[in-house]
Amino acid sequence: MKKLLVSLSIGLVTFVTNSQEANSVGRAYTEITEEVVINAPIEKVWKEFSTIENIYLNSPTVNSSTIISEIKTGVGAVRHMEMSIKEGAILDEKIIEWREGTYMKLQVIKIYKVSGIQTMGGDFELIADGEKTILRSTLNYSMTNKMMGLMNRMMGKNKFAKLWKSILTGYKKHIETGEEVTAKTELDLKNVKLISIVISK
């Protein structure tokens, strides 16, 4: 798992992002949409998602997380995440859309020690299916330059798709079992369905 984003910076040239504020869209803007069925009612699943500081319990890519904004939930709330993908890597995410009980969308507003990424964000939609919940999610990101964009088209998109599957599977596992998910947790990614990968720039 830790090799995923790091591998995007290995090749003809290595780009190091020490600190940057995510702003304009970069190269090879990509959207990856996937879904998974969680064996829990939508109210329980939403409670986990709406407590945004607890993402570290669900995601194998996050070592720790906390709220750093005065707003604690809903639009405007910002969470700070120390990542497991690379030592010292940090992402700050801000909620930019929120539909109580069913949907939230986030945008990364600060990237630290994550190479090659210009912008990143994602959304999570919950759809009730009896006593189960369909979690449908889209990861979006863009690369810092033409070379990184080419690498994303060749191999990066598939690695990001696998990364996103691990995050959705992490939510499924934690919500269904109550177990904390870490980078060492074994996850069965076969339960996640890939809907589409679209590269538009």
Image: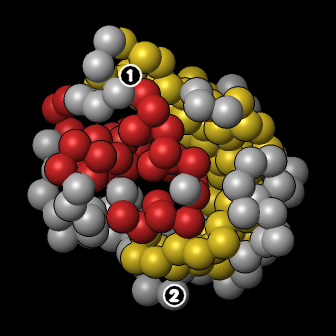
Q: Callout 2, which amino acid?
A: Gly
Tell which circle, 2 or 1, labels the residue nearer the N-terminal end: 2
Mark 1 Cα shell of 10 Å, populated few (<14), some (14-19), many (≥20): many
Residue positioned 56% across, 66% down in the render: 53
Label 2 SS:
loop
In the displayed structure, would residue 124 be above or below residue 61? above
145 relative to 44 in the view: left or right: right
Give the residue displayed 61% in from the left and 42% down from the top.
122
Residue visible at 50% across and 32% down in the picture = 137
Query: Which quarter of the rendered picture does the N terminus lie within?
Result: bottom left
* Circle 2 crowding by C-alpha within 10 Å: few under 14, some 14–19, many from 20: few
User: Residue lying furthest top in this view?
Assistant: 130
Q: Position of residue 31 (x, y in %)?
A: 59, 32
Distance (Cα) linking label 2 and label 1 = 33 Å
Q: Is residue 201 in view from this perspective?
A: yes
Relative horizontal placement of residue 187, taking residue 122 as reference (left or right): left
Inspect the image, locate mark 1, and give the three-letter code of the amino acid beneath it: Ile
The picture places residue 36, in percent across and down from the top left corner, at 32, 27
Which is more toward the observer, 69 or 19? 69
Residue under the point 87% across and 51% down: 24
Tell me the element at label 1.
strand
- Residue that carries the numbered disc 2 in the rendered image: 88
- Tell me, for residue 134, which label it has, or none: 1
